[in-house]
Amino acid sequence: MVDIIDLRVNPKEVDSLVDGKKYYSGYHMNKKHWVTICLDGSVPLDAVFCRIDESYVLAAEKKLTKGTKVISFSKTQIGKDCFMIELLACRLDHNDEAPNVELAQKLCDSMDKKGIQELVEGLKSGEQAVANDCIKVLYEIGQRKPELIADFADDFITALSGKNNRVAWGSMTALTYIAPLKPEGIFNRLPKIITAYKKGSVITVDNSISVFAQLCKANNNYQTKIFPILLEHLANCRAKEIPQHAERMAVCINSGNKEAFIAALEARESELSESQNSRILKLKKSL
């Protein structure tokens, strides 16, 4: 005799899960929403725990009023051989980012590098929703504890040239947090960053300015090559972008480049609104 457990899953997963060996159609349950797992060791225990927690979320949501959210993480999920992908918002049928943000915090608290590695691999997923959620979790981790994602700088740089725009700009966002920790590795792949800056979306461009500024701040030799890119950007970007981008650049302004920076701003002064010029004036006073 073998013990079994019936668990609710995302209906989109049922067909891919049921294999007649580890997962079976739900026993005496709605087979569109439930699967049966044999507790004979064929499915790792940690994966079963993940499925139990997911099942609770899916089942509980049916009983709640619209707009109420349930996000539950069992203690066994974080820091062990659990499938992080199953904890993403898209896997939990959430239309908001709450599960992704909470997962990021949990991974930071547990320092779970194996779980983070799984999310990095998820950036290559052919399922766009999975890749989108993975990058969200990763740059949220970067904002909190950049050292946890710093070793994946090459993965983020590679993702900049992918077709998924969300992953591209999210990867550039992650690099803004990593750059102070891994400036050499990022500088060594500068052509990739520049290409993304030239061809990327508005958000990619915004964050590339921060990456450039962090690299300039890290090393004078890097500054020699990159600071002219920032000056050229100030000369040619849309007027409405000048205050925000100038503020992003401020971290690398020093006595050696301050004069050129201010001159570039003043050259565009006539194009700016009163409020935009006020921001620029405040920035100049802070330098």
Image: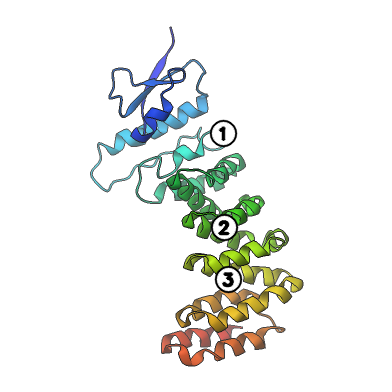
Per the image, the residue denoted by label 3 is 209
In the rendered image, residue 55, in percent from the top left (x then y), is placed at 37, 31
How many angstroms separate mark 1 from mark 3 (CA)?
A: 37 Å
> Which amino acid type is marked by label 3?
Ile
Residue 80, numbered label: 1
| Secondary element type, mark 3 | helix
What residue lies at 67% left-to-right and 64% top-to-bottom?
190
Residue 171 figure quarter: bottom right
Q: State if disc 1 and disc 2 touch (CB < 8 Å).
A: no
Q: Residue at x 41, y 33 (%)?
A: 53
Q: Are marks 1 and 3 in contact (CB under 8 Å)?
A: no
Q: Assign the C terminus to one quadrant of the image.
A: bottom right
Decide if residue 93 is on the left or right side of residue 215: left
> Residue at left 65%, top 75%?
252
> In the figure, is residue 223 to the left or right of 158?
right
Q: Residue furthest bottom?
A: 270
